Each structure stands twice: as C-alpha cells, then as structure tokens.
Image (cartoon, rainbow, N blue to C red):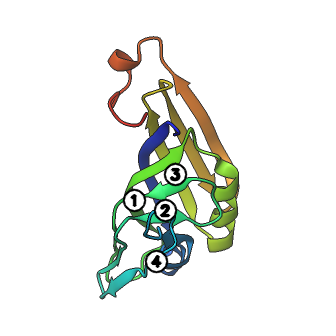
Amino acid sequence: MPNWCEGTLKVRGTKEDVKKFLLEALNPIPGGLLGQIPVEKEVEEDEWELIIRAKDGFHIKGTRRNFIENNVCFEFAEEETNLEVCVLEGFKAAWGIDPAPLAVLSKRYNVDIKIYAFERGMEFNQDVEIHKGEIIKDVAIEFDDYKWECINPNIGG
C-alpha cells in the first residue's frame, strides 16, 4: 500500500477550457472489489457553476495513481473573464506527484495546473506548477522537524 501525497489541485484557464478539463480528464472511479462496475458521473450546470459528482471520486486521466476524492464544484463568473480558477480539494497521488502526465493534460486542455501536497509518512511536501504543458516548478520541500515546521503535518502519509 502506498504512502499518499495529499493536498489541493488548482486548474486555471478560460471557463470553457477548465470545464472541458474537468469533464474529460476526471474519470469516475469504478465500483466493486476489483473495479469491475462502471460508474457514471453526475453533471449539473447552470450559469454560475458546474458540479460533477461520482460516488468514490475521480481518477485523473493519463496519470498512474492520481485521484480527486471529493465531488467537483467549479464556480465561475457570469460574465466572461480572462481566466477562471477551479480549486479541487481531496487530491492524492501515490508516493509523490509525477508532473509529466499532468503536463500532457495541461497542454491538451490549454490550462495551468498547480498542486501543493503533503506526505506525512516520508515527511516532505511537494509543490508543482505547470503552465500550458510546461513544468514551471516541481519542488520537494523537506524539513528538519516535520511536525513543527510543516504547515499541515497531519495530511498525507
């Protein structure tokens, strides 16, 4: 069983690009003991928000073991603005974050991705930022005294 690197994933782009990323790159986690039962996602949208639900959360397409455990709520401005940001709580990656497959998604959907995650078991944080497919930052932050220095030492692991 892996240690989990857990935190927040942010997606930034135009409203349409962010919506397309959320609808196409987040796949519902299948049900059943062996993942053999397909699960449909439930989508609701109005002029202010897009809500996507799945019973057990979502797998991020093209990644090895990256998940969003919570339902998705993307709130956006009624009028068109240049960029919108969707904050996805409940991000988790096995062992650590591999930014390469996320960079592919960032380029494909023309969005920026930012992740800050905590790994309690191995006592590090990871800060990742990707702009339109280019990895801008991938930093593992280590601590001399994890419980004291880390802002959220009880997350992950």
Distance between the alpha carbons at the discs numbered 3 and 1: 10 Å
Confirm or deny contact between disc 3 and disc 1 (CB under 8 A): no
Looking at the image, tell me whether mark 2 or mark 3 is earlier in sequence order.
2
User: Furthest-front residue in view?
Assistant: 33
Element under disc 3: strand
Q: Within 10 Å of the Cα at label 4, are there few (<14), some (14-19), or many (20+) other Cα atoms? A: some
To which residue does mark 1 refer? 88
**Quick one: label 3, few (<14), some, or many (20+) residues within 10 Å?**
many
Instruction: Look at the picture and state if 144 lies above or below 12.
Output: above
Question: Disc 4 marks which residue?
Answer: 15
Asked if the residue at tag 2 contacts the one at tag 1, i.e. Cβ–Cβ closer than 8 Å, the answer is: yes
Q: Earlier in the sequence, mark 4 or mark 3?
A: 4
Between 82 and 39, the residue placed more toward the observer is: 39
Residue at the disc numbered 3: 114
Residue drawn at x 38%, y 24% is 150
Question: Residue 29 location, x and y as percent?
Answer: 47, 67
Q: Position of residue 121 (x, y in %)?
A: 46, 27
Amino acid type at image mark 3: Lys
Residue type (three-letter) at the residue carrying disc 4: Lys
Give 152 or 59, whichever is nearer the viewer: 59
Q: Which residue position holds label 2?
A: 11
Q: Amino acid at mark 2?
A: Val
Q: If you read the primary sequence from the N terminus, does the residue marked by circle 4 or circle 1 appear first?
A: 4
**Residue 79 appears in the rendering:** no
Residue 82 spot, x, y in % from top left: 48, 73
